[in-house]
Image (spheres, grey):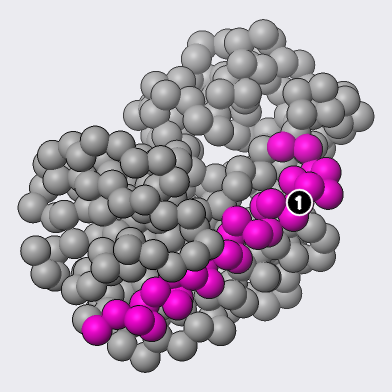
Amino acid sequence: MEGKKIVVAGGTGALGSILIDRYLDTDTDVVVLTRHTQPDHHNIRYAQWDAQTLGTWVEELEGAMAVVNLVGKSVNCRYTEANKAAIVRSRVDATAVIGKAIQQTTAPPQVWINAGSAAIFGNAGPSIKTEESVDFGEGFSPDVCKQWEAAFREVPTPLTRKVILRIGVVLQNGGGVLKPFVRLARFGLGGPIGSGEQYLSWLHGTDFARLVEWVIERKGLEGVVHACSPYPVKNRDFMQAIRQEIGVPFGLPNPAWSTKIGAYLIGTESELVLSGRRVVSSILEKEQFEFRFPEIVAAFRNLAL
């Protein structure tokens, strides 16, 4: 099915599942690269790989319309030295080996879309960050993103277009990253977290899948694209919108000190909610990409919280 095949690395994760749902029961052949194979399902096939070494999976890239790399160990963990090394390695290794695989194909994919993160800007305050911004943050999370993007850029693929998606927090049905926020709100603790002034750059899952499809179809598009809603929100407004959607009229605030203790107790890092950045896309605005859910209240209304 040449020209109608998409290869998704990391397709069994949260973002991959959103993308697979988008293409399920269409005329596009979707091949998911996974460590643990599963039975084929309609137009979804599974090919085994280890995200580090070349193998028979390379053949799946031949004649593909796109390869989409969403591989990366979750950052929702304690930043021990072992976990930090695994977070970096999972992203860099998968990116590097996909680049090598593309170089070995005789009919390379038309486009290679690689996940990145808006976290490259660190805790950036209220300043707006677009694709033209180069004042990246410092610290572990921004450094991971820099290494990730460097691994992508250093692989020459002259016959394959390359696009990095710097992805914000993707909101999806069934909870996902929203679950702990909704839980806080239901227990009356859904007030501002920390100062409440930190910005959250986000994207509805439906718009994430539509954006990937748009990038695939946009033949002349290359480089970095910010995968974020045009309306990032402050944490206090984010929490208020959750309370409004689930019908909880008040929420006690969560000061930074208690947030740090809570994060430690549940085995994660407080910076994931205490830091923030105001990331938007000048490219999507210029190209008039139409967001289905550009505003947070409408997004929550659509999601099953």
Residue that label 1 marks: 84
> Residue, x 61% and y 16% (percent of image)?
183
Residue drawn at the location 50% of the way across and 15% of the way down: 246
Residue farthest to the right, as pictured: 257
- Residue 10 vs residue 214, the one in the foreground: 10
- Asked if residue 147 is positioned above or below residue 168 in the image, the reply reads below
Horizontal relation, residue 153 to residue 163: left or right = right
Q: Classify 34 as above or below 146.
A: above
Residue 279 location in percent, x, y?
A: 59, 60
Q: Position of residue 285 (x, y in %)?
A: 40, 67
Which amino acid type is shown beneath numbered disc 1? Lys
**In the picture provided, is 28 more to the left or to the right than 136?**
left
Main SS of the magenta part reads helix
Q: Is residue 101 magenta?
A: yes
Residue closer to the observer: 125 or 154: 154
The vertical placement of 159 against 31, above or below, is below
- Residue 249 visible in image: no
Q: Position of residue 204 (x, y in %)?
A: 41, 42
